[in-house]
Amino acid sequence: MNDFAHALETAASLIGHLDAELCEIVALSLGVSLTASGFAFVLGAPLGTALAIYRFRGKGALIVAANALLGLPPVVVGLAVYLLLSRSGPLGSLGILFTPTAMIIAQACLGLPIVVALVHRMMVDVWATYGDALLADGASRPRATWPLMCIARDGLLTAFLAAFGRAIAEVGAIIIVGGNIRGYTRTMTTAIALETSKGELSFALALGLILVIISLTVSALSLFFGRVIAGR
C-alpha cells in the first residue's frame, strides 16, 4: 500500500511539474491519434453516408464487412501494415516503417470501420427523414450527401470521437509498426507497457492517469453529443 501511495504521489508530481519526457510522449500520442482519426473520418464519413443513401450490388456485403471489422484485432492490423511497409513489402521503398507515419496508418485502419459503421447507422435514419424532401427539391443523391452530413454534424463528431478513443488507447498495432523508440515513436500506451515491465511504476502511473482523463473526456463528449442527437 505504501509503495502504491508513493508511486501515486510521484506520478502526481511528474504531472504537476510538466515533466519534459512525459509531455513529449503525451504530445506525440495526441498528434498521432488525432491525425489518424482525421484520416479515418475523412475516408469513412463519406463512405458511411454513401452506404446509407445509394443502392448498388454488394452493398449488404460492405455493411456486414464494416460491422465485422469493428472487432478487428489490433495486432493483426499492425502485422498487415508491417508487411506492407517492410523492405520486402509493396510499400517498402517509402521507408516509413518505425516512424510516426506508420503508426498513423495503423491507427487509421483501426478507426476507419468504426467511422463507416457509426455513420452508416446514423445516416440511414437521417436519409429516411430528409431524403425524400431533398430529392423532391431536385437534389440528386450525390448532391444530397453534403446537406445530409451538415444535418448530422453532431453524429459525425461522435463517430470521430469514437475513432479517436480507439486510436489513443491502442498499443498492439503501433508497437509493431512504430517500434516504441524513445523520443520518436513512444506513445502513452507503449510507454506504460515498457515502464511497467521495467518496474518504473510512477512514470507508468502518470501516463495512465493522463490516458484515463483523456478517455473519460472523449466518453463524456460522445455521450453529450449522443444525447443531443437523440433529443432532436
Image (cartoon, rainbow, N blue to C red):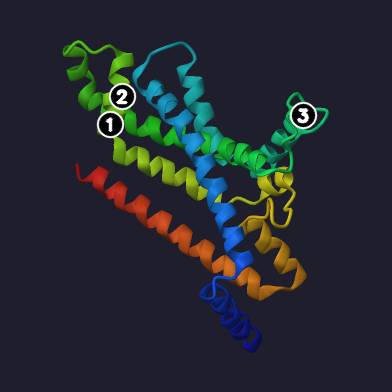
Residue 74, quarter of picture: top right
Report the residue marked by disc 3.
92
Identify the mark nearer the N-term, 3 or 2.
3
Residue 84: x %, y % from top left: 73, 30
Q: Is residue 127 left or right of residue 171?
A: left
Instruction: Measure the C-alpha gap from mark 1 to mark 3.
Output: 39 Å
Between residue 69 and residue 4, name the one nearer to us.
4
Look at the numbered discs 1 and 3 and tell me whether their residues touch, using CB distance below 8 Å: no
Q: Is residue 3 left or right of residue 12?
A: right
Report the amino acid beneath label 1: Cys
6 is higher (above) or lower (below) than 28: below
Instruction: Measure the C-alpha gap from mark 3 to mark 2.
Output: 37 Å
Residue 67: x %, y % from top left: 50, 33
Report the residue marked by disc 2.
146
Instruction: Measure the C-alpha gap from mark 2 to mark 1.
Output: 6 Å
Judge depth for marks 3 and 2 and give the one in front.
3
Q: Secondary structure at mark 2?
A: helix
Look at the numbered discs 2 and 1 and tell me whether their residues touch, using CB distance below 8 Å: yes
Residue 47: x %, y % from top left: 44, 24
Report the residue marked by disc 1.
150
Residue beneath the point at 36% across and 23% down: 52
- Crowd tier of the residue under label 1, counting other residues whose Cα lies within 10 Å: few below 14, some 14–19, many 20 or above: few
